[in-house]
Amino acid sequence: MLPPQKSTLAEGTDALFHFINITSVILLIGITIAIVYFSWKYRRRSDNDITPVITHNSKLEITWSVIPLILVMIVFGWGLTGYVNLSNAPDDAYEIRVVAKSWLWEFHYDTGFVSVNELHVPANRPVKLVMSSDDVLHSFYIPDFRIKADVLPNRYSSVWFEAIEPGESVIFCTEYCGTAHSNMMANTFVHTQEEFETWLITAGSADDDMDPVELGEQLVTRNACTTCHSADGTTLQGPSYQGLWGAERTMESGETLTADENYIRESILEPNAKISQGYQPVMPSYSGSLNDRQIDAIIEYIKTLQ
Amino acid sequence: MATKEATTSVKKLQVKRFKPDENPEKHYLNQETGIWAWMTTVDHKKIGLMYLASITFFFFIGGMLALLLRTELLSPARSFMDANVYNQVFTLHGAIMIFFFLIPSVPAALGNFILPLQLGAKDVAFPRLNLASYYIYVIGALFTIFAIFTGGVDTGWTFYTPYSVTTSGNVMAMTFGVFILGFSSILTGLNFIVTIHKLRSPGLSWNKLPLNLWGLYATSLIQILATPVLAITLLLLTMERALGIGIFDPNLGGDPVLYQHFFWFYSHPAVYIMIVPGFGIISEVISTFSRKVIFGYWAIALSSLAIAFIGFLVWGHHMFTAGQSPLANMVFSFLTFLVGIPTGIKIFNWLATMYKGSIDLKTPMLYAMVFLFLFTIGGFTGIMLGALSVDIHLHDTYYVVAHFHYVMMGGMVMAFLAGLHYWWPKMFGKMYNEFLGRITCGIIFVGFNMTFLPQFVMGAQGMPRRYFNYIDQFQPFHQLSTIGAYVMGVGFFIMAGYLLHSLLKGKSSGSNPWGSRSLEWQTPSPVPLHNFEYTPVIINGPYDYHKPMSEFQLGIATPHNGHDHHAGEQTNVSETEKEQA
């Protein structure tokens, strides 16, 4: 019933889950049998049935109050222990900054590299995510790791985990955050320690020898631009890239302009300065996460989509 | 008789038996008719029916919205509505079902009708206020409908900040509608409390109060104490949105978690506003159809009050992942488990009531059993969500959605349906088709489990709630769930059919088709305009099935309701009633 256990703490959470499930099913079966059995055994035989007067029974009532009380106290203690483990990251945990924006996840590593919607972590090493939001509430959830925490705009929250083995795990946003809430997904890539270190060094420089159009196409996917902007004319949360280049655009303010380099650049760095007619001012700024060369590449890519 | 002397120690009453008329010529439905008479009526029964019609309308709307949602979710990607429409539809489904159906369903609709009858009163304590409550409800509803047609609302029924402050759409009209609605709830609660305190018939002491009234009493307390907090919260939200005063929005220096505290401080007790009156109905139905004295009267009565009280202290369990302190999480988790105990006690008491009873599986009793089964599942999964470490995994997934529906629909709606079928003959003097009633109960039971059991599984696997798109692995569960929802929809349409048929062509039910001992059944069906043609006198508890029916149909024998000149009259009740019976 539960997803695979891919973090060290998943097993503890699952054990309690199964304990509650099994206890509940046993009690539920008992109650159901009592309902069905009583309905049959004591079914009405005539309209003049006489029933005994049983108003209460203190021993019975104390029993069925105390036993559930003991059971729930076990569950409480067990759940609390697990929660304490989930909330206290080990001191030597590797720290990654997470920034949530409507509707993407940014992961900032200690080298200064930023990945969007891709979380890369080493296996068998505690990782602590320090998270904040740029706009509304989001919630960071990796089912395989059994971790979740709301991401807030005015304070930091954190989660930690230790992945057991290399592999991939999906990340969901679980706090409703508007139109593309259900598209605010990301992936966790768990590497071995060496692979992770190699990735961290090369990640930033891998794009160097790519031609601009190809790079631009990769960047709009990697930076989650495609969550809201299509390349085929479909209208999503934002205008499509297709036919954008050089077109006459009408803004919400009523002014018209031509979609040129400066317009696209401004739309990436200060998205809410000019809003195309019919759209909402919801795009987060990419200032600081995309450099000039990357912006050039995206512009080159958009030019090809006529 | 000891009871009688204890309760009327000051003056002795002369009583006689009043047998209810089986085919009353005049009753509340054929007196004071006409639209204007209905609209200005202060009769609690007509107001109850007007509420019943209104909540049925909203249940229909909310239900259709649910079917739309389930249809869209048949496939992982977009099928026939886009994300923004979907978000508005799930918001409306939640807001309508909770604020316009569940909260007024039992207290305002069934409660209004039954409460004075069970007290032997002519009406509630403040009949005009009661009518005002109804119109406040209508005005609140109009604001909500206005909001839907002027931009819609896509915040979820929880209106979490800062999203609700920044999104477009008419959040203000919607919250204003809910704000107004709250007053209706508060005034109804106030009315009920005063009525239960002041308008009980002679002899109706607190230990003879029907458990339905204990349920309504506990509910009314919560309504009065919790609803103002919702009003304050929505007012603050409106101030923030309209005037830019920073309370919850971090951009203005506010704190979004504060909003959640405020919101759940109302909304957690509110789920008890929704479920506690259901407990009352189940107690009545199980005792009546087992024809047996209720087991553990005080345990059931006081556990309702205990739930009402502890229910105020558990709101934080909605926020285990929201960023409140670990200490707060621990305390809220602990208190959450405590609130489970009185709920469990009730389940066992109801089972014990059935033991050695004379059980008649009529439609209301079937719904009561469905309630026992589904609500127990709702309770157990609540224990699951109360456990801190497990909740971290399950929070904001479909597991929560399924749990909530098991408690609210499996619990409250089933209790409501039990009550509706139980009191239907009292309301209209007509019977519905018993066979169709039982079949429909079966269809709804199957459809319900088909809809929501798969949601537990996909929630445990990590499917987040409020998702327009989802990843492919969840599709089989969503499809099963959708088919279940259709089955349930069919069930409700059949119910609408046989209930309408009953209204138009139903067989006369007689005054007391279930052989109940409770006071509301000792007057004709449909009920006379002023409920009782005499002042009832109560000497037995409402579940004393071991005593003859004649002892439950007593009223003051003298005209003028015994107000004059009989101090010093000495009448032995049991002798009198023997003579009359």
Image (spheres, coloured by chain):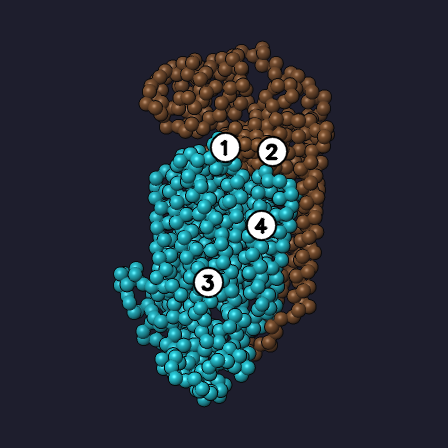
Chain colours: A brown, B cyan
Q: Answer few, some or many: residues within 10 Å of disc 4's Cα (few below 14, many 20 plus, some between 14 and 19).
A: many
Q: Nearer the viewer, residue A65 or B283?
A: A65
State which quarter of the image contains the C terminus of chain A. Answer: top left
Q: Please identify, in this view, whether the residue under mark 3 or under mark 1 is nearer the observer.
A: 1
Counting from the top left corner in percent of width and height, residue A72 is at 67, 53
Amino acid carrying mark 2 in the image: Ser
User: Residue at (49%, 73%) from the top-left corner?
Assistant: B204
Tell me, yes or no, whether dots 2 and 3 are on the same chain: no
Question: In terms of secondary structure, where does tag 3 sit?
Answer: helix
Residue highlighted by disc 1? B253
Amino acid carrying mark 3 in the image: Ile
Circle 4 marks a residue in which chain?
Answer: B
Residue highlighted by disc 3? B193
A66 to B21, vertically: above or below: above
Circle 3 marks a residue in which chain?
Answer: B
Q: Please identify, in this view, whether the residue under mark 2 or under mark 3 is nearer the observer.
A: 3
Circle 2 marks a residue in which chain?
Answer: A
Earlier-in-chain disc, 4 versus 1: 1
The residues tagged by marks 2 and 3 sit, at their Cα atoms, a distance apart of 45 Å
Which disc is residue B314 wearing? 4
* In-image side of B393 versus A92 (left or right): left
B312 to B553, vertically: above or below: above
Q: Mark 2 touching mark 1, by CB under 8 A?
A: no
Counting from the top left corner in percent of width and height, residue B570 is at 46, 87
Residue highlighted by disc 2? A157
* In-image side of A132 versus A30 (left or right): left
Amino acid carrying mark 4 in the image: Val
Amino acid carrying mark 1 in the image: Gly
Q: Is residue B121 visible?
A: yes
Tell me, yes or no, whether dots 4 and 2 are on the same chain: no
Q: Please identify, in this view, whether the residue under mark 4 or under mark 1 is nearer the observer.
A: 1
User: Residue at (57%, 36%) from the top-left corner?
Assistant: A150
